[in-house]
Amino acid sequence: MSRHPELVASLREAGHRWTPQRESVLAALAESARHLTAEEIIARVRVRYPYLNKSAVYRNLAFLTRLGLVHQTDLGHGHIEYELHQDPHHHHLICRHCHHVLQIDHAALATLGKKLERDFGFQADLDHFAIFGVCKKCQTRAAKTAKRAAR
Amino acid sequence: MSRHPELVASLREAGHRWTPQRESVLAALAESARHLTAEEIIARVRVRYPYLNKSAVYRNLAFLTRLGLVHQTDLGHGHIEYELHQDPHHHHLICRHCHHVLQIDHAALATLGKKLERDFGFQADLDHFAIFGVCKKCQTRAAKTAKRAAR
DNA sequence: GTATTTATTGCAACTGATTGCAATAAGGAG
DNA sequence: CTCCTTATTGCAATCAGTTGCAATAAATAC
Ligand SMILES: [Mn+2]
Ligand SMILES: [Mn+2]
Ligand SMILES: [Zn+2]
Ligand SMILES: [Zn+2]
């Protein structure tokens, strides 16, 4: 019935239900190698369930996020993007000039997590961060432009 | 004409204009001691300009954000919140259980900024971060509940 | 299998925010 | 001051996402 027997059993125990709509949303994310927008998820799900309602998709994305199975992240593309939670965690550096998205691994944020824990007793959710800024290339380009303007 | 003569001069030089609408949005933020939602800004601006259109408010918030004068942040209250850029920078730790917002100063993120610069050549915009997680109080409460459940 | 409970769905209405476009007015030149 | 250019505004249409609610169907008990 499902390719996630343990997950389904634990959901049922918590009073939740395992519906075709819910499975199809999870499957769309599992079959993708990259972040997907809600619109992309709806399109993929509708290949099998042509009349699936968008509310069900949005509600299931929120549900799966609450369970920690899915991440919702604003990567600066104008829409929230969804991705299955992966171990080990990763994060993204996004250039505000060229919009390039660089994936970095969790190690870069581990120190911050410990500091927040130590200094404020705060257990930060450092699962999937989007950090905006200016990438190496664009910094170099900006420096050249400034130099040219100075002449 | 304006309480920000230098700002206005630099805007004009860049081909921008200084309108009453623009000034009123900046004034609403300057007069507030806390983050404001777009709805709150519109309400405050309309005390003086009753028919000011919401598009102008949103567009000016985006404009002032592009200039680096304003921060837009999702603090988990269901709406984006706006705040004047302040020196020195600060950040916020937001509890996903009790929704408490703790302000912390920039020092906590300085090390991360240097690390991203050193390891990836990435100049991160660490101006006004919202970090979600679980606060000290809620961790203690959760631990007690778990203990009680175990008995 | 049937009956019962209620989480989830589908649908339509709604909300916060964005966009296209014609009208307006800020800023600069004369 | 008047004239000109065009950034900005106001408005209506639109968009992505949410919500209220009645209908459906998943899960459990029998
Ligand atoms: Mn990712
Ligand atoms: Mn703040
Ligand atoms: Zn770049
Ligand atoms: Zn808390």
Image: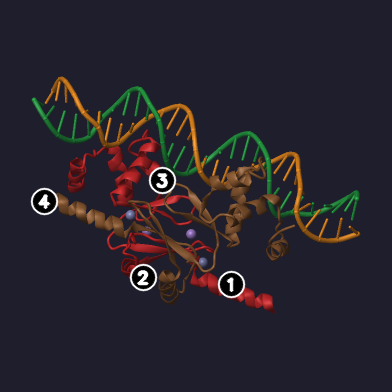
Chain colours: A brown, B red, C green, D orange
Element type where label 2 sits in the image: helix
Q: Is residue B114 positioned above or below C18 on the image?
A: below
- The numbered disc on residue B38 is 3
Q: Is there any visible trace of residue B31 in the rendered image?
A: no
CB atoms of marks 1 and 4 within 8 Å: no
Q: Pinpoint residue A89: horizontal percent, then vertical percent.
A: 50, 67
* Quarter in which the C terminus of chain B is drawn: bottom right
Q: Pinpoint residue A106: horizontal percent, then vertical percent.
A: 45, 69
Element type where label 4 sits in the image: loop
Under mark 1, the amino acid is: Ala
Under mark 3, the amino acid is: Ala
- The numbered disc on residue A38 is none
Name the subunit of mark 1: B
Label 2: few (<14), some (14–19) or many (≥20) C-alpha neighbours in 10 Å: some
Check disc 4 and report the residue beneath it: A151
Q: Distance between the residues labelled 3 and 1?
A: 35 Å
Residue plotted at (33% across, 38% down): B48
Check disc 2 and report the residue beneath it: B108
Q: Is residue B126 positioned above or below B14 on the image?
A: below
Q: Distance between the residues labelled 4 and 2?
A: 40 Å
Q: Are marks 3 and 4 on the same chain?
A: no
Residue plotted at (17% across, 44% down): B9
* Quarter in which the N terminus of chain B is drawn: top left
